[in-house]
Amino acid sequence: MEITEVRVFLKDDEDKKLKAYVTVTFDNAFVVRNIKVIEGSSGLFIAMPSRRIKQPCSKCNFKNELRSKFCNQCGGQLSVNTQPVSSEDNRQAEHKDIAHPITQGFREQLQKKILDAYQKEKAGSGTGSSLHNLG
């Protein structure tokens, strides 16, 4: 599988950890949007697109945000997970990847291409969106 295009959308606020959103095209045929470039404690890394995990109400089966106390549909009290979780695990437990690399090797290749394109965009025009054809 070949990464044929990387589009970088810089974020304006330099003080935030989220630095950019990225869209990646594979084999000129498949697109993954909303990959995030994030500034972590040990440097830049990518986060794959994800969605918040929902929990169903036991009364009406409406899907509510994880750790909600009451159902947004019927108002019934929701069961609460009583296991203590660290704040880092807590954040990860609330989200599930929509798309992600299967192997560590491909993840490293994808991250390198994205971070290279991010650095070029940041050093370049800085207009906020740039196309980097790789094929």
Image: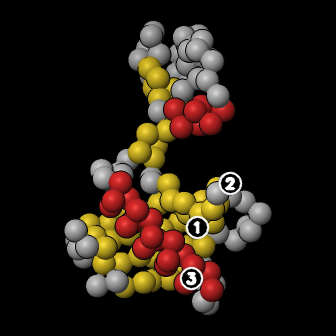
- SS at mark 2 in the image: loop
Residue at point 64%, 57% (across, down)? 42
Say the numbered circle drawn on residue 121: 3
Q: Is residue 75 above or below residue 53?
A: above
Answer left or right for 113 relative to 69. Answer: left
The amino acid on which the numbered mark 3 sits, given as a three-letter code, is: Glu
Say the numbered circle drawn on residue 41: 2
- SS at mark 1 in the image: strand
Q: CA distance from mark 2 to mark 3?
A: 22 Å
Q: CA distance from mark 3 to mark 1?
A: 10 Å
Q: Earlier in the sequence, mark 2 or mark 1?
A: 1
Camera-nearest residue between 105 and 67 = 105
Say the numbered circle drawn on residue 20: 1
Q: Is residue 43 above or below residue 117?
A: above
Q: Earlier in the sequence, mark 2 or mark 3?
A: 2
Q: Position of residue 28 (x, y in %)?
A: 24, 76
